[in-house]
Image (cartoon, rainbow, N blue to C red):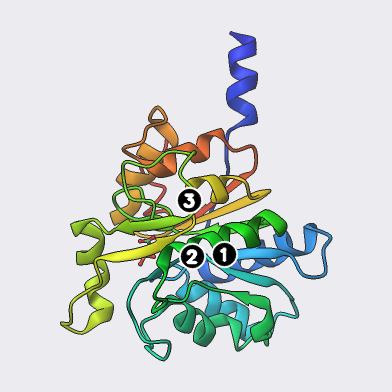
Amino acid sequence: MTTIYVLIHMHTPQIIRTNNFGTDAAAFITRALQETGKSCPVVCLPSGMTPLPVYKAMREADCKIDLHYVALDEYIGLEATDERLFSNWLAREILDPLNIPKTQRTIFHSMHDDTEAECTRMKAFLKENPLDIAVIGIGVNGHIGFNEPPSNPTDSIRIVSLCPITRQNNAAYWDGGRVPKQAFTLGLKEILSAKTIILMATGASKADIIRKTFDNPVSETCPASFLQEHPNVILIGDTGALSQLS
Ligand code: PGA
């Protein structure tokens, strides 16, 4: 019994409940970056609604941080100037305001005519420059990045077909237009190899999947549940998202 408890304890995420999500999560990310001890840690950052107040807080705090940004995921088939590209979205929200040079941004090229070569290039980059910190969000279906269910920790960087629920949830950004069906994503393999993982979740709509992620047995049907097997996960959420956690 004691042994089992210790094993579970080692893999229990640090859970931060916050009423001031934006500023608290921003402070946590900033501290985690500093604690790497590196002048330019390698970091993936999420897009979506969840991180908006976090990036706002980081902009307003005028954070003096440096990092090498690696794309977590990206739609396939959009022009490089398309404002809906995650790389452009993140540039506007956080990378440009923090003055992260373009040379410190490793992104997927959405319109590349050889999408497999894009995956190979990203794998090679991360092999040489492993993630120090993976900052991620979570989909209501348990995806992290675009690792849609079923996904498992052997899945590497690849092209994925987006689930109907993901396309439906992302439609808000598309102003009635068609959400792409395919995307690039880092695999669970690369995300779970980060030394520190910071998962951000807000709102009651995420309560059920956060419970499944941390309280249910690990399963391919909830890709985020593999976070239970990582030794250094920080979950930062508001009371809505964490309301069903035991
Ligand atoms: P959201 O997206 O922050 O807009 O909820 C998260 C995700 O789908 O990964």
Disc 1 from disc 3: Cα separation: 14 Å
Q: Amino acid at mark 3?
A: Gly
Name the one closer to the observer, 92 or 180: 180
Can you tell me whether the CB of the residue at mark 2 lies under 8 Å from the nearest atom of ligand 1?
Answer: no
Above/below status of 180 relative to 177:
above
Characterize the local packing of mark 1: few (<14), some (14-19) or many (20 or more) Cα atoms within 10 angstroms.
some
Q: Are marks 2 and 1 in contact (CB under 8 Å)?
A: yes
Q: Is residue 7 left or right of residue 19?
A: right
Return the residue found at the far left: 176
Residue for badge 3: 187
Q: Secondary structure at mark 1?
A: helix
Taking the spot 84% from the left edge, 60% from the top edge, the residue there is 37
Residue 6 location (% of width, % of height): 65, 20
Can you tell me whether the CB of the residue at mark 3 lies under 8 Å from the nearest atom of ligand 1?
Answer: no
Q: Are marks 1 and 3 in contact (CB under 8 Å)?
A: no
Q: Quadrant of the N terminus?
A: top right
Above/below status of 212 relative to 82:
above
Taking the spot 26% from the left edge, 60% from the top edge, the residue there is 166
Residue for badge 2: 117
Characterize the local packing of mark 3: few (<14), some (14-19) or many (20 or more) Cα atoms within 10 angstroms.
many
Q: Secondary structure at mark 2?
A: helix
Q: Is residue 245 left or right of residue 175?
A: right
Residue 39 location (% of width, % of height): 82, 69
